[in-house]
Amino acid sequence: MQIASVSKPVAAKDRETGAVAGKPTASVTQRVLADSGDAAGVALSDSAKRRLVIGKSPTPITPPPESGLETVLFADERTRVVSTDQQPWKLICALEIEAPWGQFVGTGWFAGPRTVITAGHCVFDKKQMGGWADKITLTPGRDRERKPFERFVSERFSSINAWIERQDPDYDIAAIHLDQDVFPASEVFRVGALPDAELQDYLINVSGYPASPGGGTELYWAKNRIRAVEPRRIYYDVDTSGGQSGGPAYIYPDENSRPIVVGIHAYGVGGTPASMNLRVNSAPRIIPEVVTLIQAWIAGLKTEGATMHDG
């Protein structure tokens, strides 16, 4: 199977390039991480340790009684984070997206010193945005009007050919390229493809900037256990809502390790196949081919079947 990167063109914004990728039918059997650096993380604050879920659990976190809501799966268990200048919250960005058909909000996260990963539909969406975003303003660690780090504006984006060409939800992944380093490589999220058997039962954290509550200016976080694993998708009982697309779905092997992103949050229950008979949200999964692609984005390299452009 081959996937290829497609970057926002300079002039012909509707040009789509790259080899079409096929969906894998086999389980993921190898463990691949996007960097070979120190796995030890920056020490977490006591408040972060109290919130974040770490390691595995044989049973899910007990949910409250079911309600009729959609992507907020039961009673809303999301928690607003205010210590956004600390790990890992500072690595998560509020996105203000300006597109041909309007303005939108979304979420991204640092996978490299100047590379922010998000959902494909945050940079390119034919039906909602009218194509490629014109520009995106990123604010790491935003909390309402408080911006503990600089704001950054980018017009350079990349996504996967299968997303650009046919809006395939399993390939709803993209990168936003910045012109300067923001955080050192030793502090950013690790990106990991874990085998099915290892990924199953991990406790997972999902963070992002929803449109409601907060208008895309407040960081929210929730947790639970991974409920199901497919070759291209992971499913979890974690509350989310619009605007959190692109946020990291991440695990902590232990409290002293760097967080590992195993999926890019993108879908509520409407994106869950009816055949699964589960009321869960989901993320396109990080698999070895995606790790390779993200490594290329971080390194600023071209990939086969695609041309890199400055927007």
Image (spheres, rainbow, N blue to C red):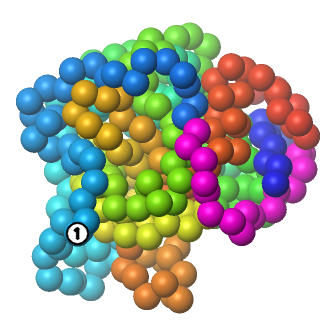
Percent x, y for residue 7? 77, 36
Mark 1: few/some/many CA within 10 Å (<14, 14-19, 20+): few
Percent x, y for residue 156? 69, 28
Q: Nearer the viewer, residue 26 or 133?
A: 26
Q: Quadrant of residue 308?
A: top right
- Magenta segment boundaries in residue numbering: 14-32
Left or right, 186 with respect to 298, comes to left
Q: Nearer the viewer, residue 58 or 129?
A: 58
Percent x, y for residue 63? 17, 73
Magenta stretch: includes residue 151: no
Q: Residue at x 27, y 42 (%)?
A: 219
Q: Amino acid at mark 1?
A: Thr
Q: Main secondary structure of the magenta part?
A: loop
Q: Is residue 184 visible?
A: yes
Q: Is residue 75 above or below residue 180?
A: below
Q: Residue at x 71, y 28 (%)?
A: 296
Q: Is residue 267 visible?
A: no
Q: Residue at x 51, y 29 (%)?
A: 111
Q: Quadrant of the C terminus?
A: top right
Percent x, y for residue 225? 30, 62
Left or right, 59 with respect to 154, comes to left
Q: Quadrant of the N terminus?
A: bottom right
Q: Residue at x 56, y 43 (%)?
A: 31
Q: Quadrant of residue 20?
A: bottom right
